[in-house]
Image (tube, rainbow, N blue to C red):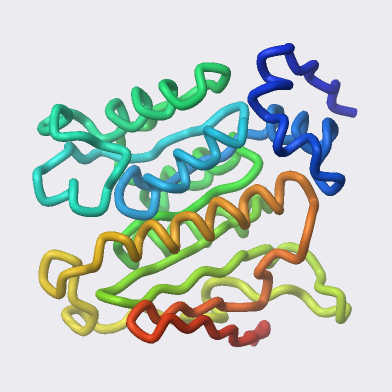
Amino acid sequence: MTTALPLSDEELERYARHIVLPEVGGPGQQKLKRARVLVIGAGGLGAPVLEYLAAAGVGTLGIVDDDTVSLSNLQRQVIHGTESLGRPKGESARETILRINPHITVELHALRLTADNAPALVAGYDLTVDGSDNFDTRYAVADACEEEKKPLVHAAVGRFDGSVTVLKPFEMGTDGKQNPSYRDLFPEPPPAGVVPSCAEAGILGALTGVMGTLQAMEAIKLITGIGEPLVGRLLLYDALAARFETIRYKRR
């Protein structure tokens, strides 16, 4: 049984708006303090994920990113400032979130996640939030989380739309059937060149804020055990129409 971590007087005041929520309370805040969350990417999606999980009091945040901050990042990657140009994104992100909350611990992994190193990385954390921007990384982290039996919060964005889901394929659903995996949702990556990159197609900066914040919300639900996570459900957001839709998917 995990020992409850006491909250200091400063933490009690900092998290007061959480603690007064009956669904969270002191026990939920202690779960957040004990939690270890791995975030893949400190970019457009990773920025709001890291900022809101840090503000929420998640005790340990791991950041996987081997890139440096460029000027074209700043339109959407709000965790970085102009003064961070040329710096490693992980270091810049760590500096920002420790300013938000000095009570947390940040672990940097300045590397590119691959199928070879992903299992060991995700095994050291309670859950993973994927903010990557390429299919190789998405499949690698999804397969590793399934192998290591770790929940995964996945999101993707493009131009004016985005999607988010939660993957727990190692568990049974309420219907008594095994939950679907990432490969049930996307059996194989699209052919090269079919899905353009952000640099090629463009992306509205605020869109990544919407989707990354939804990822942070799902992570907090998983940690505290409240609400109904998006397991077996893909939440779709059309920014231009201001419309959300949810589709259900099952194990093949």
Percent position of residue 155, x then y = 45, 65
Q: Position of residue 32 (x, y in %)?
A: 69, 35
Comparing 28 with 240, the one in front is 240
The x, y position of residue 78, in whole percent, is: 29, 44
- 48 relative position to 4: left or right: left
Relative to 76, is 146 on the left or the right?
A: right
Q: State the image quarter where residue 69 is shown.
A: top left
Q: Is residue 162 above or below residue 205?
A: below
Relative to 107, say whether 241 is above or below: below
In terms of depth relative to the viewer, which is nearer, 232 or 96? 96
Q: How many marks on residues? A: 0
Q: Is residue 110 above or below residue 222?
A: above
Residue 166 found in image quarter? bottom right
Look at the image and tell me in which quarter the N terminus lies.
Answer: top right
User: Residue at (88%, 78%) from the top-left corner?
Assistant: 176
Residue 199 lies, in percent from the top left, at 12, 65
Residue 67: image quadrant is top left
Q: Camera-side residue: 169 or 40?
A: 40
Look at the image and tell me in which quarter the C terminus lies: bottom right
Q: Residue at x 34, y 23 (%)?
A: 95
143 vs 1, nearest the viewer: 1
Residue at 60% x, 72% y is 181
